Every structure is written in C-alpha cells, then in structure tokens.
Image (tube, rainbow, N blue to C red):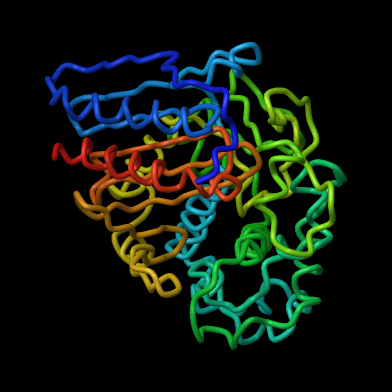
Amino acid sequence: MRTLLRTTTAAVLAAALVGTAAGPASATDRLTDLAEELVAAGAPGVIVRVDDGRRVTEFASQAPWTRRDHRLRPDDRFRVASNTKTVTATIALQLVAEGRLALADPVERWLPGVVPNGGAITVEMLLKQTSGLYDFLDDPRLVGLITGQEPRRWRPAELVAVAVEHPPLFAPGERWDYSNTNYTLAGMVLESASGVTYGELVARRVTGPLRLTDTHLPTDATFPGRHAHGYEPDAEHLAPHLPPGTPPGLGFAGPEHHDHVDVTGIDVSPAWAAGGMTSTARDWQRFQSALLSGRLLPREQLRAMLATVPQDAGTDRYGLGVMEVGTPCGTVWGHTGGLPGYSTHAFADRTGTRTVTVLTTRMERFAPENTAVEQALFHAAVCRMYGR
C-alpha cells in the first residue's frame, strides 16, 4: 500500500499515564506501538485517551516534521467534526422531553417551504439519517469550502438549498444514508422550536452545565486556545486519492511542507450543527459520560437515542446522533468525525463509565492505506477500556 509520507519515522512526543489503579502494561504498550505504527505510516499526529473507569491512559504521538508547527499534547483542542451531531440530537431530545418538540413532527411544521416534501420528513428521520435527503457536501460547489480555496460564509439555509436542488436518494424513512443536510436542518428546527440560536442552545444545555470550558462552537476560522495542527496531503500527493473527474490540481489551502498542507486555518464553521464544534479528548469524554449515564436526558429519550438501525450493509448501527459499533472486545456507543486535518473516534460503554477517544491530525478518507492501522489502534483502545 502507498504511504503518503515516506521520510517520517515514528516518534512518540509525549506519553503520560495518570491514575491510581494498576493496568496491564502490555495493553498500554500495544496502544503506543500502534500509535507509532500509524505515525510511521503517514499520520502527522495521534492523540489517545482511554478511561476504564479506574485509570486514565493518555498520550500523544507525532511525526518529527510537525514539531516546528506545534508540540502535540493529549489535552490539545481538536475539531471533533461530526461528533457534534450527538450534541444536536441531545438538545433535540431535551426539547422533546419538555414537550416543545416531537420526534414525529414534520420538518414542514418548523421550517415551512424549506424542504420539498417536508411534510413527509420527520424530525426523527433527520436525526436517524433516514430522510433520503442529498448531502450538500457531495455538491461540487462545496469543494472550495472544504479545501479552503474558496472561503465563504455559507449560512445553514443556503447549504440546505444546495442539497434540495438534487433529487432525494430515496423516499423518507425507506432506508439509511448519511447526510450532513439532515443535521443542518435539525439545527434549524431547534432554533425554530426554541426561539434561541443553536450556539446558545449548546452553551445553555450542554457545555455550560457540564463546565466544558475547552469545548466551543466557532463562528469563523478562529481556533481558540492551545490546539492541534491538522494536515492533509499537498496537491501532488492528494491526487491519487480523489475520484475520477476531479479537476486537476485540486489541493488544500495553507502553508506547505513535507508533502503536506497545514489546514488548521481553514474556516469550517459552516459545518455548524452537523460538525462545527471543537473540544478536547477529556471534555468530550465528560460529555459522553454525562449523556450515557442519564444526566442529560430522561430515560425515555435516552432509550430513543440508542434505538438503532443498520448503517448501509455494514454491522455498525445508527440511532439518534449516536453510532453503535461492535469491536472484538465489546460494543461501544458514540460517533466518528472527519474534517480537513482532523479525524475522530469518540466512544463509551453503555453506562458512560468507560470512554475511549482516538484523534488523528488528518482525515482518514485521504489516507485509505492507513485505515487498517487506525482501526487496529481504535480496537486496541476499546480493549484497553474494557480491560481485555
């Protein structure tokens, strides 16, 4: 398999184990070995944090060439991307519990005229990814936003308008298909139902009550606080990973070195309710623990969130903003995410007692040859979480 970065050797920049209970050294060694292997295979950097309910294991590994930009640490802020969907679904279910919204409500009720056939698409379909709506990120007009070459402040309604220019993929509720349009619409529904902006809802209902001081919803390219730098291949090394018909010379905007582009400064705030949040591994694990332990949702709404349907033809399943993923050491609940320069796997056990987070400073989709190593690292982290 092709390696994007041939000159990088593995390096663990920081390794720290904190806690009081002794854990199996072999499990930790396995994690650090796999993180080194992933960096050697081309990942610019990796953060791993595992909490097994008694002991926290966390460390960061990075390629030597990235050190001049930033010294990676386990507590660095990160773009958590589509993990934001879990927050959006949580707020929606809080409003359901309060009687201000219903999962059976049609989109048309809250956003009249915004979506064709909006009377047949329910809030639950949006949150469960079964609406059939086209994903606006698949439209060529959004390429410049993702690469940073054509920065623009896309408003949520504009992104939805791009999506609904395309015919639906299937009839509402017929099957499952992942679409960021669903969660952009969900954010718009939340604002309509509550009379409060999405950012205020996040602050009042999630980050404020949980005191997640390192978790934010940026409204521009600003990345507050100490944060990990994200990277993608330069145009030459990106080309082999693009689909046929992609315009020649397509690349990311940002400073270039070592066959990569530092994409940290790309404004991805239009991801908004579908993927715009930034956080740290520790903050996000606190959120997941609070959610799955029942601190954020009543029992009925949490049960609805975790009622999953199959994702495509795979074994993974999807609920309301939550993925149910099977691993060799047990099932976990959470979400994955990907934005330019950032890839996230953030999961927990069913009770929220144990959590695992693996963050990589590049998107998995542009390094498919590294997928097996990244998956092995995630599975090893889950096994460490479960003490197996």
- For the question of whether residue 243 can be seen, the reply is yes
- The residue positioned 53% from the left and 48% from the top of the image is 337
Q: Residue 108's spot in the image, x, y percent?
A: 68, 79
Count of labels shown? 0
Q: Residue 219's spot in the image, x, y percent?
A: 74, 38
- The residue positioned 62% from the left and 58% from the top of the image is 194
- The residue positioned 41% from the left and 65% from the top of the image is 318
Front residue of 135 and 45 = 45
- For the question of whether residue 208 can be seen, the reply is no
- The residue positioned 21% from the left and 41% from the top of the image is 383
Q: Which quadrant is the C terminus positioned in?
A: top left
Front residue of 358 and 190 = 358
Q: Residue 287's spot in the image, x, y percent?
A: 41, 40
The picture quadrant where one finds residue 33 is top left
Q: Is residue 344 above or below residue 179?
A: above
Would you say 147 lies left or right of 349 here? right
Q: Residue 204's spot in the image, x, y percent?
A: 55, 41
Would you say 238 lies left or right of 310 here? right
Would you say 215 lies left or right of 380 here? right
